Amino acid sequence: MLAEPLDHLIDNAVVTVTAAPWVTRKEVARLPRLALWAFCLTWLVPGLVGRDPWRHLDVTSFAIMSAMAEGRSSWWQPVIGGLPVEAGLLPHWLGAGAILLLGDVLSPLLAVRLAFGCLLGITMAAVWYATFHLARTEAAQPAALPFGGEAEPVDYARALADGALLALLATLGLLQLGHEISEELLQLAAVTAYLWSTAAAPWRGVSARVVMVISLPVLAASGAPWLAVSVGLVGALICSRSSYPGARNLVPWVFCSLGAAAAVTSALSAWSWPYALQLSWRELGLILRQWSWFLWPAWPLALWTVWRWRAHWSSRHVALPQAVALCAIASSVLLGGDDRTLMLAVPGLAILAAFALPTFRRQASAAIDWFSIFFFSASALFVWFMYGAMQTGWPAKPAANVVKLAPGFEPQFSVVALALGMAGTAAWVALVRWRTARRVHPLWKSLVLPAGGVVLCWLLLMTLWLPLLDYARSYRPVVTKLLPHLGAPNGCVAVTGAATSLLASLEVLAPRRYDASPQAADQGGCTAWIHVVKGEGTGLPDTLPGGWELKARVVRPTDRDEQVGVYRQQPGAR
């Protein structure tokens, strides 16, 4: 007789500001490890295999790593096309080392992506264990039930850790950038390792200190020395105010790590100040709009945690992830809204989001579930609909829109891609049925559908739409058309006016010796000249000084304002 009223009272309890709400044992049921591993692998593997390096930092970073591994670039001063480029050295050393170590077994691109995929794995593990240790602290524990039956501390911590990992996987901004080759992935792993070290200090004394000493120097050597200083200082302050001796004893090791980070940054001459806050109201509005989708759904849950745990702002389970996330957000704003730096705030926000789960009422959880079902189901249907239009040409209008947006694209059919897409869709249907067919009690239930929906859409994009995305986001269509006019593979090609990503794509997709110095075409050592012009209405000249004659004019299918021309020298011009 009392069971139903008690359940109703627990589900609708008002959260006090002195402790977490009541949490029963059935609410901390463990997420099956097989299901959790399936979530992580299905999120991680698509996007790491089977695609070209995309424009901008993805292909640029890989080109630098390849040049280092092949001896075409100094390991201390990276160059592309003979021109120096700004880059954090340690991530590129990691990629070049992966090529040298695995190059005989795997392709260079797959070797690098395997190494950076491991960094994502470290990020996932560190977020889970950091949340687990923070949830074990006394201030984070739920209130005791009047008649017993409350959750055990370890089970409660495990349920919140599962929720934090699901929140990490569900965050939209981590999808594309997290699967690209960039120095920010090593920064992300270093930030989450730092979070774990600070969170685990009361229970993992030696290992926490070792990771602490390593994490900040790695963050500094990856191109973020000032972020390393800021998170180190706020972490030392939070630990010094902790009631746990293990956390207070970590403070000297934080300063040792800061000293090592300063030494590494000085050795690499990386103490430049990249920040310059010059934002208009319009730019600030664009940044806020970026946050609204990039950090979804972690940011509303994190704000809810900060409000409902407002009496515990000085406690480590709220103060630590909040401080680290704010440092990354401030750094992103000072860089003009840089999204790659904003990605470093995701682990802290995911941890904060987990602590919102015990405070949810049933109505809030249901709202998240139904929004996730409708939004991600509609997104998946749209992907399937456009895939069918691309493959069959029907309906005609959507197929014509694809041709208009990506001229020259030829759809490719893959049985493997189709099978993976169908399997992912079937798994989504089963997940929705499981969530809606019965009353589910575990704390992590509210994040299962958001994480599952993100994983489904990413899987469909990286299987059904991958040929189209490769065609639109890589320089392969341009390089393929230029290749017949570039001469022998051991020849030299002069390049002028090209963006760094195009120059990097040329080195990766059409290996030659490219010389982007201003005098390259006049020195007489190059057999071809690639000249790039930008701007609407700007055309390539038929000839260039020195007897260079235009042989091919190429326009990237999804960017009509950039024209790439390849010139060959007329016989006897010199």
Image (tube, rainbow, N blue to C red):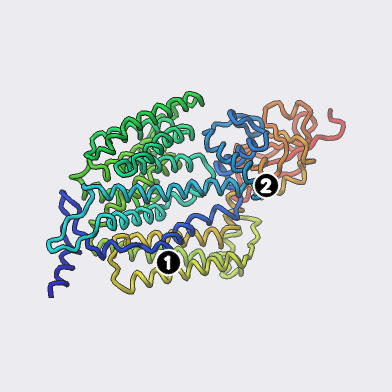
Residue at 60% across / 55% down in the picture?
Answer: 50
* Vertical order, 489 against 521 (above or below): below
Tell me where residue 434 appears, x and y as whole percent: 37, 71
The earlier-in-sequence mark between 2 and 1 is 2
Do we see residue 215 in this rendering? Answer: yes
Tell me where residue 280 appears, x and y as whole percent: 37, 35
Residue at 25% across / 37% down in the picture?
Answer: 245
Residue carrying label 1: 377
* Vertical order, 415 against 333 (above or below): below
Quarter containing the C terminus: top right
- Is 564 on the left or on the right of 547, as rendered? left
Residue at 56% across / 44% down in the picture?
Answer: 58
- Is 217 on the left or on the right of 413, as rendered? left
Disc number for residue 104: 2
Q: Nearer the viewer, residue 390 or 194?
A: 194
Do we see residue 300 in this rendering? Answer: no
Q: Secondary structure at mark 2?
A: loop
* Vertical order, 511 against 515 (above or below): below
Q: Amino acid at mark 2?
A: Asp
Looking at this view, name the residue that lies furthest to the right.
Answer: 572
Q: Nearer the viewer, residue 255 or 185?
A: 255
Looking at this view, name the residue that lies furthest to the front.
Answer: 206
Rendering quarter of residue 415: bottom right
Task: Classify 10 Å Cα crowding around label 2: few (below 14), some (14-19), many (20 and above).
Answer: few
